[in-house]
Image (cartoon, rainbow, N blue to C red):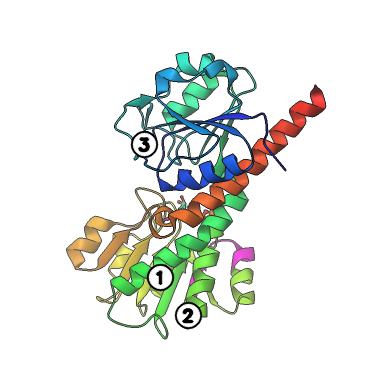
Amino acid sequence: MMLTGMHVAIIGGDARQLEVIRKLTELDAKLSLIGFDQLAHSFTGATKMYIDEIDLSDLDAIVLPVHGTNLEGKVNAVFSNEQIFITEEMLLKTPKRCTVYSGISNSYLDELMKKVNRKYVQLFERDDVAIYNSIPTAEGTIMMVIQHTDFTIHGSRVAVLGLGRVGMTVARTFAALGAKVKVGARRTEHLARITEMGLDPFHLQDLEKEVKNIDVCINTVPTMIVTASVISKMPAHTLIIDLASKPGGTDFRYAEKRGIKALLAPGLPGVVAPKTAGQIIANVLSQLLFDDLKKRKEKA
Ligand code: NAP
């Protein structure tokens, strides 16, 4: 599998993008790097340039940072001081075949991509990426629990809320460390799976009752679920780690008022394992680019 003949622009991003650059240059893609001018390291096959220097008419793909852009279209680039914006005018100069990749999207990008009618892929929406990412997320959660408690995870009573891709990995990982793990879900097949995993299942509608004797609560449900009335039932020493995407699913105001430590912990893979997190993106992205190239060759 090689990407010879593919021209890819990597626009902005953090350390994770270095793994993408490494992998794609290894696979012989031609790379234009925008937003990397302050990076001392150089890669063979990759050319650093400024946004106004790139030949957009020749691009097969644009790779944006994990967060895409902000709501004004500005790209975060930790290796540059340049102000980089993704605009309609710019994307319209790319060939029709040009695919745009980001981790997650926002209203600005959704709207823009509809207007310019280019293929747009959000890598973090893929099941495989979410499952691979759940591994560094669980490790980051362990780090946070260790940092913010004075007891061992082993033997502690941990409630995990949600049995999605993150919840399942977190529950399994804490159980493997010797915690007594209970998992809250709302679907009967999830309750069955929790039982199969050797953990204690409970229905999320019983959450208030179930938090009365826990030491740690780890939320993965992206909706307000750890409410004031749930928090009021927890022992005072309970640590709440909220992994759900911003703004989380915890009433942080009430937790603070009650003196219960509650922490929103976004983006753990990029924090605890940027290299692995970058490799996860690089592996999936290179496969998608390769599929694209193959399809194009078949058509030609
Ligand atoms: P997921 O696979 O969709 O799992 C979400 C879980 O929440 C599912 O079990 C779902 O149950 C449950 N849920 C959703 N809405 C609910 C509701 N209203 N009431 C009860 N349960 C509900 O998502 P994921 O990949 O595990 O990710 C979970 C969250 O973590 C997301 O917000 C994601 O962005 C975030 N995340 C954070 C990090 C980090 O570093 N902090 C890393 C990765 C992901 P049903 O199947 O019954 O709907």
Mark 3: amino acid: Ala
Q: Is residue 139 left or right of residue 229?
A: right
1 and 2 marks in contact (CB < 8 Å): yes
Residue range of the region highlighted in magenta in the rendering: 182-190
Residue 124 showing in the rendered view:
no
1 and 3 marks in contact (CB < 8 Å): no
Give the camera-side residue of 263 and 116: 116
- Crowding near the residue tagged with mark 2, few <14, some 14–19, many ≥20 C-alpha atoms within 10 Å: some
Disc 1, SS: helix
Give the camera-side residue of 6 and 146: 6
**What residue is at 48 percent from the left and 61 percent from the top?**
136
Disc 2, SS: loop
Rounded to the nearest angstrom, the CA distance separating label 1 from label 2 is: 10 Å
Residue 284 showing in the rendered view:
yes
Label of residue 177 in the image: 2
| Image coordinates for residue 291, horizontal then vertical, percent | 72, 37
Check residue 278 for magenta coloring: no
**What residue is at 56 percent from the left and 46 percent from the top?**
282
Among the two numbered marks 2 and 3 on one chain, the one whose residue lies closer to the N terminus: 3
Residue at mark 3: 77
| Image coordinates for residue 185, horizontal then vertical, percent | 52, 64
